[in-house]
Image (cartoon, rainbow, N blue to C red):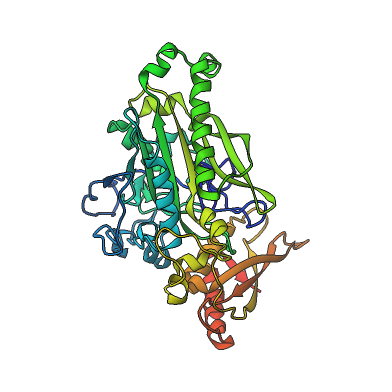
Amino acid sequence: MFKSLTCGTFPTRRTVRFPAIATLSTRLDANAGIERGSSRNATSSFIRSSPPTPTCRSSSSTVSTHSPLLGRYSDPSRYLNANPANNITPHIASLVGRDLHLRPSHPIGIIRTKIQQYFSSLNNNETTFKIFDAEDPIVTTQQCFDDLLIPPDHPGRAPTDTYYVSESTLLRTHTSAHQSQHLRSGCDAFLCCGDVYRRDEIDATHYPAFHQMEGVKLMHPRSVENAQGLTGKEWLDSPECRMVESDLKSTLEGLMDHLFGPTHKRWNEDYFPFTQPSFELEIFHNDEWMEVLGCGVIHEEVLQLSNRADRRGWAFGLGLERLAMILFKIPDIRLFWTQDERFHSQFKEGSIVEFRPYSKYPPVFKDIAFWTGSNKDNDDFVENDFFDLVRSIAGDLVERIELIDSFTHPKSGRSSRCYRISYRSMDRNLTNEEIDELQFKLRDECASLGCEVR
């Protein structure tokens, strides 16, 4: 999973969560993710029917708003169960299967189509990019982590960062989770697009569900035949490795020009466990440099795990929300999920237009303060758990949560935190009474996190 902005790229190098969502200024964070197929854990209570076969299309096809692909994974009962490892809330389950990326007149769908059209223009006798954009969002830990060399102790595997269905299955945290399955099936070039899920902070650019695009290309065997048998430093120093890197960079620079028009670009070295070497691409847009994606030459071990050790290639990942917020000038990531026709009526298939705000309802601010743990040696409070609790109670009415004060009691050693919650609807005025009701429920539920409300 390349560094992902809530709007998404390759898995991130951050220590707390895989993708990183940036701000709308220098860095617009947009969730990133990895995807993989899923299997049932024989020891868990999670039972479901076999997932539909992954849908592959040519890179020139589109999906209509009445496509049978829409909503095929929208049954919440697939994600909510009594398994002790399950930490998916009804709010999250209600988002799965919305398939915003398959709606041709939705900003996410418009960006997806433009990217796929660009790669379709690159098809030739040696390379044809296959399209996978309707795959099961439930994947296995092997697909999402092990096949990508993400170690067992990586914090991104923790239930504080990831939504688990069972001990061994989860909602994919990045579209890279499907990489190994498609490589094993014999695909040499493909794009994989879908919704991904991560527990994260709450503000205008972070959302627990977002969309990513993964791209993979294996080079023609003739172009790297002189590198057969090379490993480690010998491979990294070879002309063939530099050729793969050059093909990757020229392809992605072309994609940025396709989306933004001719623009200045710069490359930075980066680190992802599944690519080596690894890079991030930035573009100069609206008078500032913005990171837009992560990428790299596919790690030798990833290819070995995918039964493609005889091949070399590259991969990239990007977040669709990130790009859509920039190109359509959409200020709040929650707007992508609204049902309000005043939002949807502004967009049509194939066109990028600037979003026109249709209302600005005032926020309602509420503070909540609580003690965490019984003492300094018994404090396992995790901020993401609190954020997820707030979302499970108030849903998309939550605009932002800020930590405004914290201190440690000098005698007891207990920690205190005070958060300011901004509630704002994008569609109507909120009343103090309805928000007070939510706030009282939140105060009661904080006990489930081991917190004592002050």
Quadrant in the picture for the C terminus: bottom right
Quadrant position of residue 403: bottom right
x, y percentage for residue 193?
A: 39, 48
In the depicted structure, whether residue 220 falls above or below residue 200: above
Residue drawn at point x = 46 percent, y = 47 percent: 33
**Residue 310 seen from this side:** no
- Point 45% across, 35% down: residue: 315
What is the residue that sits farthest to the front in this orientation? Answer: 262
Corner quadrant of residue 369? bottom right
In front of the other: 138 or 428: 428
Residue 30 percent coordinates (x, y): 54, 53
Q: Residue furthest left?
A: 49
Image mark count: 0
Query: Residue at horizontal 58%, vertical 38%?
Result: 280
Say if residue 341 shows up in the picture.
yes
Q: In x, y percent, where is residue 451?
A: 59, 66
Asked whether 9 or 78 is in front, the reply is 9
Q: Quadrant of residue 365?
A: bottom right
Relative to 358, say whether 324 is above or below. above
Residue that sits furthest to the right in the current view = 410
- In the rendered view, would you say 120 is above or below 250? below
Tell me residue 50's x, y (percent): 21, 50
